[in-house]
Amino acid sequence: MYKSVDQFMDYVIAKNPGENEFHQAVREVISSIWNFLQDNQHYLHNNILERIVEPERVITFRVSWRDDQGKINVNRGFRIQFNSAIGPYKGGLRFHSSVNLGILKFLAFEQIFKNSLTTLPMGGGKGGSDFDPKGKSDNEIMSFCQSFMSELYRHIGSNTDIPAGDIGVGGREIGYLFGQYKKITNRFLGVLTGKGINWGGSLIRPEATGYGAVYFAQEMLNTKKLNFSNKKVLISGSGNVAQYAAEKVIQLGGKVLSMSDSSGTVYDKDGIDNKKLSWIMNLKNVKRGRIKEFAQEYNVDYLEGEKPWGIKCDIAIPCATQNEIDEDDASTLIKNGCICMVEGANMPNNSDAAELFNDKILFGPGKAANAGGVAVSGLEMSQNSMRINWSSQEVDAKLNDIMKNIHNQCVEHGRNGDRIDYIQGANISGFIKVADAMLDQGCV
Ligand code: NDP
């Protein structure tokens, strides 16, 4: 049996060489549940630790597709079916040039605990490709998605594995993927979530991750008798999660000072209001342009190549990608008066930054704070199975309840005197349900 977190991590690193993001995610979970495990030795005696860090199945495949010039291109496709103890695999697909096995394993591993926290019956999975959608025509995106699904379809199913969107995979891509799945199988099934509203999608699914992160932040602020009203908020990213986090912050009376993309940050001192936000949504979702164009249109500051973390704020909601905040950024944010850090993205803080925030200010880790997206995906699956559609109000109310419930679970397992350790709370709560199901199901 392992005597320390470091000893266990030596095993994980030796078995999964070079997968740095995966090591980072495993270390965070294992460190925060280590003391709990010492008090609950039956998990260790049944070797749950070695079992939970080993994916049940990893699928990689070739994706060949033709571009507009007729040239054949080749990318690599992946699906990580990590853990199905509490339900079919569930987790998004990411299309981004940085995608590799280690990144998808980190995301799938996080997804196990996140899905458990939602209280819905969903296991953990993730997939994607190193395909870069930037600058590709609609036709090229369709060609890629069709080729990707021509292999993926044999591994997924509404009771097996139900992918959704993530970076680079939004409504357009889900449409092309679903169309190809239906063509190959001749079945109209709820095999993907994030579908269009006219063909099996759920209201509020596009909004769910961003709204959910802000609902979670609101619960955290409540513990200090604070709220969003007049708070200065930094948001990074300008994709799906960022857009709807911004929309909800504005609704709750907060002032959104920044949004960004991988080229730079816009800093709007007056605050991005609803009108400006719909301009950004059109820019990003229809014109597929760069955030710099917003700065030109509204004559606000543009910080080329920079992230937003040097701007003074009360609340920060990173919604772009992993490891976008390091220890220096974290120190600057805290020094400048930030009281609450909420992870809209998955693992946007590196380990040192997360530790610093968790010690000093309210810190909402991604697996709790951004679980609203997969939670509403779970509600989309329920609606598909029952062949009914809930109204926006119904779905939004359920989302709000789920986020409150996740917050309560974090408090239950993370309270430490006056302080709530949300990392510990989320990891222990998420772990117990999955590990108990694994024990019940025997050595499989
Ligand atoms: P989108 O593709 O819609 O948007 C991603 C945004 O982040 C874009 O503005 C993009 O800019 C920026 N970005 C991506 N990679 C980088 C990078 N390496 N450096 C700087 N900026 C970058 O993705 P989502 O909004 O769906 O996802 C954002 C985050 O939220 C991810 O971490 C994802 O895993 C997480 N998440 C998403 C959920 C969902 O429901 N969609 C659910 C839970 C978590 P550019 O266009 O220049 O690349």
Image (cartoon, rainbow, N blue to C red):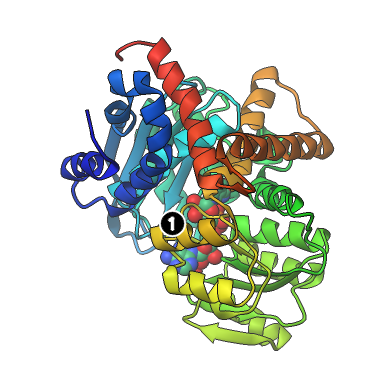
In depth, the one of 126 and 64 nearer the eye is 126
The image quadrant of residue 373 is top right
Return the x and y of residue 368 as percentages of the image width and height.
Answer: 57, 43
The image quadrant of residue 443 is top left
Residue 147 showing in the rendered view: no
User: Is 403 situated above or below 365?
Assistant: above
Residue 303 located left or right of residue 101: right
Return the x and y of residue 421 as percentages of the image width and height.
Answer: 55, 47
Q: Residue at x 44, y 32 (%)?
A: 124
Quadrant of the drawing holding the N terminus: top left
Quadrant of the drawing holding the C terminus: top left
The residue that disc 1 covers is 140
Residue 316 showing in the rendered view: yes
Return the x and y of residue 353 as percentages of the image width and height.
Answer: 45, 63
Q: Tell me which amino acid carries mark 1.
A: Glu
User: Is 234 situated above or below 430?
Assistant: below
In depth, the one of 88 and 411 nearer the eye is 411
